[in-house]
Image (spheres, helix red, strand yellow):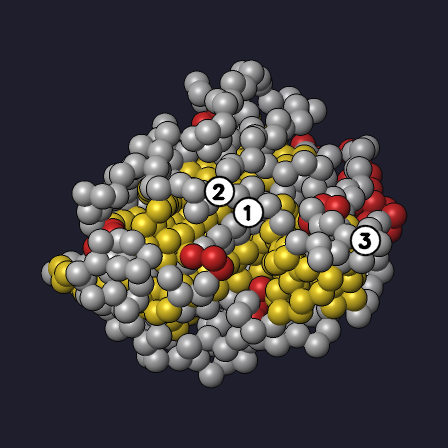
Amino acid sequence: MAWLVAVALLALAAVGADVRAGVGSDDGVVGIAYLPGLLNTDRFALPPPPTAPPITPTLETPSAEPTPPTPDPTPVPPDEAAPAHYVSPTATGAGDGSFDAPWTLQQALSQPAALDPGDVVWLRGGTYTGTAFSDPSLGRVSFTCGTRGTAEAPIVFRNHRDERVTIDGEGNEVALFVQNCSHTWFWGLEVMSSAPVRTPSRAYIYVTAPDVKFINMILHDLADGINLWTAATDAELYGSLIYHNGWDETGGGHGHGIYTQNKAPSVKKIHDNIFFSQYGMNVRAWSTNQFVDNFAFEGNIAFNGGSLSENASRKFNFFVVGNNPKAPTRNLVVRHNYTFAGNTTTTPACNAFGPNYGAVDMRMEDNHLLGQLRVTGPYTNAVIARNTILGGTALPFITGTGFRMEDHPDNIYAQDVPKTGVEAFVRPNRYEPGRAHVAIYNWGGADAVDIDATALGLRPGDAYEIIHAMDYFDDRITRTYDGGGTIAVPMTGHTFAQAIGSTKAPVSQFPLFGAFVIRRVGPPS
């Protein structure tokens, strides 16, 4: 990294900036983010599970040297000991929700009398299809959620014992309609559309319900992966893989990994997801007549934004913009995110946080942002520090007005990427011990990269899987940890899933960059 510091110093020498090199570690995952414009600063922290003690953060004001985040308690996942019910794709509708007489999915989503707050609904493996209702504005809806848990006792819909559970929107316009419910979690489910033709009416997940969570989901080949609208207050999208969403038009790609808006005092948490290869943007938080307030983007990996489109339109990994002079982006946390843009796409993906009308009360810290950073201020009361901001493509590494590098000297700025070395970032999963997302910048092009096994929570003798994010269901390597301190992640020889209804070949960034899910699948023998 020494050459990188030198490049940054050359860029800032005129103002005597003190540029500090970053290291390839995560320094303690998700914590509490303190923003000056909020009365309740704890709202940006991931909440504890119902059985955990409450978090009582101290109110602080950001400074040039921000206070390190305080880790939250690790959520306790539901298990078979919790009040449990079962759902099966072969259920007849006459069952009572037991293992031998399961409900249909729509029965469970309608909250039968036996389904209480705090209960877990286990979905058996298989493909779930159907049409719950049709609406003149929404179209045909496959499944609709009507469950109501409580803050202390949410209702959880989760795949049973790691079985593959697929909700297929088929030719419907909405795969999952989440409006008339609250305090409901969806966990470990695949939601997709098998429709062979890509149009704007393709299925998606529509969310306007308050206090819902989507955890470790697989959302692909939809119109948008998920829409979290303003009414979906205090929603959380965590640990999910979101890819191959959208459709193409002459003017460019449409449909995004996530399309979202938010208004204070609600806080939306977009944490530890892997976004890649949409037709439109990976992450779109945007509004001209609503609000882009109180977002926490932490620990996300985003690459190949817009790469499925055949058109050379603008492409983004992150596009977080309040397009309203009276409502700029406010109270924004952008921390520990990792993006990549290469010259292997028609137009390299960019990152935008607050352009057009700027951002008020923003913390952008400890990110690796590869690809052009688009900035147009003013940035009012912003802490922008310890970021690595690189170009790596034919586009300038930064563009826009109202942002001066000399005002934010505690970052690395450079047009070119390193030619040697490795930076690997491990994000342990808060909900599933033994599971982690990994982003690898393999600057030297090595065939394999060693990852710290302790960060993954592996013990000698543990069986584990290395899962290539771009072919989640088929590119898996199973090994046993030998206790040597590291595991080797291959950066060559990988396969890639093909987007449904597309003939365009998937865009690979190997060997320079790769994203993986690594998880423990068995205890020591």
- Residue that numbered label 1 is attached to: 432
Q: Nearer the viewer, mark 1 or mark 3?
A: 3
Q: Amino acid at mark 1?
A: Glu
Which residue of the protein is positioned furthest toward the front in this rendering?
Answer: 100
The residue at 80%/70% (across/down) is: 447
- Residue that numbered label 3 is attached to: 483
- Residue that numbered label 2 is attached to: 77
Judging from the image, what secondary structure is the residue with disc 2 in? loop
Instruction: Tell me the quadrant of the picture where the C terminus can be found.
Output: bottom right
Q: Quadrant of residue 173?
A: bottom left
| Residue 98 location (% of width, % of height) | 29, 54
* Distance of label 1 from label 2 (alpha carbons): 7 Å
Judging from the image, what secondary structure is the residue with disc 3 in? loop
Sequence-first disc among 1 and 2: 2
Q: Counting other residues with Cα less than 10 Å from the Cα at mark 3, is it few (<14), some (14-19), or many (20 or more)? A: some
Q: Counting other residues with Cα less than 10 Å from the Cα at mark 2, is it few (<14), some (14-19), or many (20 or more)? A: few
Sequence-first disc among 3 and 2: 2
Q: Marks 2 and 1: in contact by CB < 8 Å?
A: yes
Answer yes or no: is residue 436 visible: no
